[in-house]
Image (cartoon, rainbow, N blue to C red):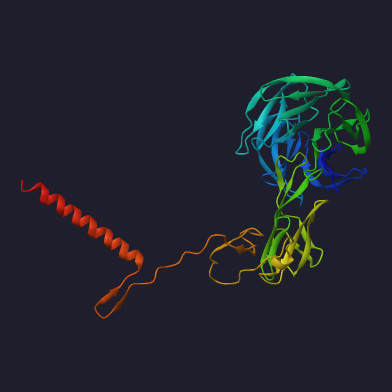
Amino acid sequence: MISFYAIATDSTGTSKLYGIDLAGTSTPLFTVGSWFKGGLAYYPPTRLFYAIAQDTSGFSSLYRLSLDGHVQLLFGLGYRFTGGLTYRPQDNSLYAISSDKTGFSTLHRIDLAGSAPALFGLGLSFVGGLTHDALNDVFYAVTAHGADLSILYSIRLSAAVTPLFGVGVQNRGGISYQAAQKLFYSVHSDAKDFGYLQTISPSGAVQVLFGLGYGFDGANVCVSPFFGAAIKILSPLANERFLKNENVVFQAEVLDASGTYVVSDSSGLTWLSNFDGTLGTGVVTKSLSVHNHQITALGHGLQTSVPARVFADLWRPIRASSGPPTRAIRSTRPPRALRGQWSSPSWKPFAINASPSPFPSATRSPPTTMSGSTRTRSPFHSARASTRREAASSMRTAISRAGPT
C-alpha cells in the first residue's frame, strides 16, 4: 500500500512522481514534467493531486495530476513558489509559500479560479515544505538554510509564526502531517543529495526511516490521503433489515486520518457479503439473499463491515424478534380497544404486543323506531324531551305574570 507520494527531479530537470510504502520501497509512477520543485498536495474536492513547477526564470505554475498519468497546467502563480503546498479543509483551499530574491518568504492562499494572493510574511528561507493539521487548524513549515540547521515553525492565519525546534540539516524535501499517528514525515538530504524519509514527533524527536534516492529535495512529499484513513459506510445501516428481492443501496465515503473531512467517495471500493460474495464496485444497488449478512466495504488498503438481515416475508422479523410472545395483527383494518408497544421501527415489518384495553368500549343507544303513528324512544331521549317541556312552561308563566308592556 502506498503511504506517501513524492516528486523527485534528476540532474536533467526531469521530474517523476513516486509512490512510497512504509516497507521502504520507492516506486516511480510516471513522469510529470520538468523542475517540479515547489510542492505537492492532495485536493479532496477534485480527488486529484496538485503540484508546483518552475521554469528556467524561476516563474512558478500550478499543475493538476491524476494517478493515471494525466498532467494538466492550470495557471501561473508568480516567481519562486518553492516552499511547499498543502490543503486546508476549513475553506477547501490550497496554500503555498513563495520567496523573493532576498529569501524572505510569504504565505499565499491559492484560488483555483486563477490567482494566489499573498497573506503575510513568514521570515527567511521557508523552502523545506508546508503542511496543515486539520484538527487544530495550524500550518507547519520548515526553514532550510543550506547546510545549517532546519527549524520547524507553526503558522496560524492570525499571522502568528512560532519557531518550535530543529529537525536536522538540509530538510528541504517536504513535510507532511499524519493525524492518526500524530507524526510529521519529512525528507532530508545528505551531502551527496541522497534523500531519506524521517519522522518528527511533536516533541522534536527525529527518526530516520529509510533512503529514497537522489533528487528528493523539492518540498514535494505528501502523505497518501488513504494512509490512516477510515471507511464510513453510509448505506446499509448497521443491523438494517430488508425483505427478499428488496434493492439495497451500498454506499460509503472515506474520511481522512483526522476524521474531519472526506477524501474520497465510493469510487475504488469493493462490496462483499459473507453469504452472497462480491456485490460490486463503487455505488451498488442490489438485492440480497435471505440470510444474516456481514457486509464489507474494501479498498485503498482499508476495510470496514456492518451486519444486515434479509427476511423472506413481512412477518418473519416478528417471529425472529426477541422478547415476550407477540400477537401479530394481520387484519387490514386497525384494531380497536387495544393498546400495544411497537416491536420494531415504524418503517420495518412490525408486530404489536397487545392486551385487552381496561376501558370498556362505548355502546350505542338503540335507534328510535316507528310503529305506525307511535314513536318509541329510549329513556335518555324521553328525559331530554321532558326537560324541554318544563323549560317552555316556566317561560310562559313568567311572561303572563309580567303583563302587557
Q: Nearer the viewer, residue 273 or 147?
A: 273
Is 58 left, or right, of 191 in this rendering?
left
Where residue 329 appears, as percent x and y from the top left, is 61, 69
Q: At 81% from the left edge and 32% from the top edge, which residue is drawn?
A: 175
Q: Can the viewer see residue 362 in this picture?
A: yes
Where residue 239 appears, as percent x and y from the top left, is 73, 57
Q: Can the viewer see residue 145 in this picture?
A: no
Where residue 12 appears, as percent x and y from the top left, is 84, 38
- Above or below: residue 192 compared with residue 383: above
Is 263 left, or right, of 404 in this rendering?
right
Q: At 83% from the left edge and 29% from the top edge, which residue is drawn?
A: 172
Q: Nearer the viewer, residue 223 or 134?
A: 134
Q: At 73% from the left edge and 36% from the top edge, which residue is drawn?
A: 52
- Outermost residue, bottom side: 372
Corner quadrant of residue 348: bottom right
Corner quadrant of residue 128: top right
Q: Nearer the viewer, residue 8 or 322?
A: 322
- Above or below: residue 6 compared with residue 312: above
